Image (cartoon, rainbow, N blue to C red):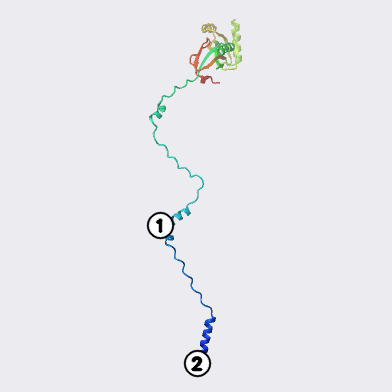
Amino acid sequence: MRALFILLLLLNLGVLAFLTLPAADEPAPYPPRPAPEGLTVVDEETALAAAEEQEEVAQEPEISGEQPAAPEEPDTALPSLEEQLPLLAEPDAPVRDAVCQVAPVEDEDAAHALLTRVQDDGLERSRIVTREDQAFVGYWVYIPPHDSMQAAQDTMAELGDHGLSDYGYVGGDQYEHAVSLGVFSSESRSRNRQEELEELGYETEVGERHRVVTRYAVLIETDEPDPALPDADWEEVDCADYEA
């Protein structure tokens, strides 16, 4: 009896616990199946190509503006015969250098007179040119240099005793202490003087005498070899010899 009472008590306790404890959570329902028209079938090769294309786009940098033009290929084609004709044409005739002509005159006044006539004829490229020259003076008769001035003076005193004149002392150059016996315009007259002194027992010599003079001329420069020029003794010369 006692055992039955305990069994009923346990059954009541079990029913009470079942009714008072919370129920366990139910599992989440499965998602709905998609419609057949919404499915896309992708094979393995297509998926791989799409992945590579996306990777290339991600790695390629963005370039703003216009792309640079590709370099032009050099033109290696040979020129045509018509294009080569100008290269084969004969060259122009060389340009002739300026022509210079010069006319010597007697003195400075004559040079200015000729220059005026030349420029009046339209030859503006003209001018007077000068140069230093040695002018022949004559034939000099002289007694060679003595050892001293006193010796030369003694000889001149003797010449005076012989009734001679036109003699003088020479000094200051290579003929120092010589005695000059005159300068003659002709060689024959100088020889006569020399013979006269040799008859008196004097040894003499004959030499040429020169002096420095200035020569004048008119120079013209033209582009033609034979321009019309005023009357003068014109001579063609090298222009470089008369550069200013």
Q: Residue furthest top?
A: 163
Residue 194 is situated, as x and y percent measured from the top left of the image, at: 53, 8
Amino acid found under the numbered disc labelled 2: Leu
**Disc 1 target residue:** 46
Q: Nearer the viewer, residue 234 or 105?
A: 234
Q: Secondary structure at mark 1?
A: helix
Residue drawn at (53%, 81%) of the image: 19
Residue drawn at (43%, 56%) of the image: 50
Residue 41 is situated, as x and y percent measured from the top left of the image, at: 41, 60
Q: How many marks?
A: 2
Q: Nearer the viewer, residue 149 or 87?
A: 87
**Disc 2 target residue:** 4
- Give above or below for 179 relative to 46: above
Q: Nearer the viewer, residue 29 or 56?
A: 29
Q: Is residue 57 visible?
A: yes
- Give above or below for 160 relative to 87: above
Residue 139 is situated, as x and y percent measured from the top left of the image, at: 54, 10
Amino acid found under the numbered disc labelled 1: Thr
Picture quadrant of residue 152: top right
Task: Tell me the CA gap for discs 2 and 1.
Answer: 77 Å
Q: Nearer the viewer, residue 230 or 160?
A: 230
